[in-house]
Image (tube, rainbow, N blue to C red):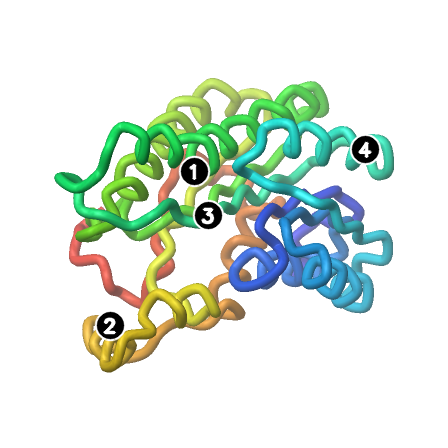
Amino acid sequence: MELGIRGRLALVTGASSGLGRACALALAAEGARLAIGARRMDLLEAVAAEARAAGSPDAQAYALDLADPASIDAMLAAMRDRQGDAEILIANSGPPKAGAAANLTLADWDAAYGPTMRSMLQLVYAVLPAMRERGWGRIVNLSSSALKTPIPNLTLSNAFRAGVLGALKTLSREVAGDGVTINVIATGKIETARARSFYAAPGAWEKQQAEIPFGRFGKPEEFAPLVAFLCGDGASYISGTTIAIDGGLSPTLT
């Protein structure tokens, strides 16, 4: 299927590995121009090279630390100077620290707000004006299955990702008339290096797999095609939705 995004500039954050990398390469295969950001520039440059080979000849890598608002501003400015305004945003961030609610401090909450919630809003507010002026834009936030069912011991993620969802749902109604769609992915258990490290304890990986109806973790290559589709012309009437990619893990109806 031709998605109709050839030549459109897509900004993908957290793109040096895992889901961000898979989404960037899926968009590259559709001919989108790419601006990718992350902290690990060695890995990021390798992804940019893969993207150029896959169909995005001017893919560019930018240093980005989502915990630092100044870094976000600097990345956005460099992207605009070199490539222009983003027409697609894949807003992807890492998780905050784990912890039971009763064991967290207010300092923990303060530390988690920036990279988990504020950074996502900073990116959205930065790209939205040009999208609205152009009359076309796509924003996809890569979030967590915690949006469907809160995950024990991941209090900060449960709270801040739900906060981002509330903000984006509200915003999606405000900008729909401008041709901008905003959707959120409730990401389940996908096999990435981060997931491997999180479930590194003996037997933990097998225990998690047993809870998934498919009996296995998903693969990034099974995740990215839907994200790419949401960026295309065929998804122009889909907005304000939260879509689970979780192998049927969530027991909720919506």
- For the residue labelled by badge 3, is the local secondary structure a helix, a strand or a loop? strand
Q: Earlier in the sequence, mark 3 or mark 4?
A: 4
Residue 152, horizontal then vertical, whole percent: 17, 52
What residue did someone put label 4 on?
Answer: 84
Q: Can residue 6 be seen in the rendering of this structure?
A: no
Q: Nearer the viewer, mark 1 or mark 3?
A: 1
Q: Earlier in the sequence, mark 4 or mark 1?
A: 4
Residue 41, horizontal then vertical, whole percent: 71, 55
Query: CA gap, disc 1 to disc 3?
Result: 11 Å
Residue count near mark 1 (Cα–Cα under 10 Å), binned few <14, some 14–19, many ≥20: many
**Horizontal side, residue 98 vs residue 75: left or right:** left
Query: CA gap, disc 3 to disc 2?
Result: 21 Å
* Residue in view at x 24 percent, y 75 percent: 204
Residue 155, horizontal then vertical, whole percent: 23, 43
- For the residue labelled by badge 1, is the local secondary structure a helix, a strand or a loop? helix
Residue 191, horizontal then vertical, whole percent: 42, 71
Q: Earlier in the sequence, mark 1 or mark 3?
A: 1
What residue did someone put label 1 on?
Answer: 116
Q: Can residue 129 be seen in the rendering of this structure?
A: yes
Query: CA gap, disc 4 to disc 2?
Result: 43 Å
What residue did someone put label 2 on?
Answer: 208
Q: Earlier in the sequence, mark 3 or mark 2?
A: 3
- For the residue labelled by badge 2, is the local secondary structure a helix, a strand or a loop? helix
Q: Nearer the viewer, mark 4 or mark 2?
A: 2
- Kindly identify the amino acid type of the residue bearing the numbered disc 1: Thr
What residue did someone put label 3 on?
Answer: 142
